[in-house]
Amino acid sequence: MTAENSTVLGIDPGLDRTGWAVVRRGQSGALSLVACGLIHTAAGQDLPKRLDYIYQQMHKILAEYRPAQVAMEQNFFLKRAITMANTVMTRGVIILACEQAGKTIFFYPPKRVKMILCGTGAADKKQVQRMVQLTLNLDKKPEPDDVADAVAIAICHQKTAPLNQKLSIQAAFLEKIKAAQAAQLKKFGK
């Protein structure tokens, strides 16, 4: 990511509560929290209405903040099947909104986010919140947990994206060299 496209939307998806956060890297390299919030749907509402509301809210966030990239938690389900199905559907409408906005989505497992922010994949919620607070120089820890997680996901992407981009460029370059070598060998009949 370059200075011009250094804004990341972090998302912690959930049907009841979807946390979101926009984190920007300034020209000095410092990260700052632009905005964050929670998309909350009522448990008594019909599922299609809840999903539509999440989609509409995500669409508004993408239009207002115009992030260069989107980072979302990659869920691992150890909960009930209904919770898993609802989260999968929620992720689907979020992915659709991002695709329609032309945004690439990067997925991060919770343990990787914790490792990048706290130095251990076993960090608890309070440790993650504290590291978010320290990293962004915030007066208080972001709350609730869903919002703090979204901020952490955006920070994780901000910290890892430049290296990942360089590795992708290097891999593409190596593939071109390999193809050129193969073409040379074929040309000379070897």
Image (tube, rainbow, N blue to C red):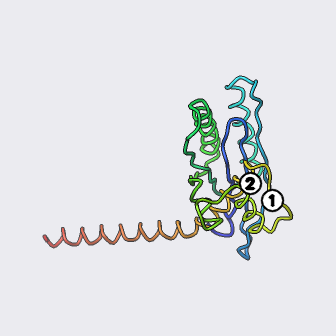
For this rendering, which residue is in front, 163 or 64? 163
Residue drawn at point x = 47 percent, y = 66 percent:
168
Tell whether label 1 touches label 2 (CB within 8 Å).
yes
Residue 21, label in figure: none
Residue drawn at point x = 51 percent, y = 70 percent:
166
Q: Position of residue 111 (x, y in %)?
A: 57, 57
The kind of residue on which mark 1 rests is Lys
Residue 148, label in figure: 2
For this rendering, which residue is in front, 168 or 88? 88
Question: Would you name the residue on which mark 1 appears?
Answer: 141
Vertical placement of residue 150 versus 180, above or below: above
Residue drawn at point x = 61 percent, y = 50 percent:
73
Q: Quadrant of residue 77?
A: top right
Q: Helix, strand, or loop for circle 2?
A: helix
Vertical placement of residue 41 versus 170, above or below: above
Quadrant housing the N terminus: bottom right
Left or right of residue 25: residue 85? left
For this rendering, which residue is in front, 71 or 5? 71
User: What number of labels is visible?
Assistant: 2
Q: Quadrant of residue 79?
A: top right
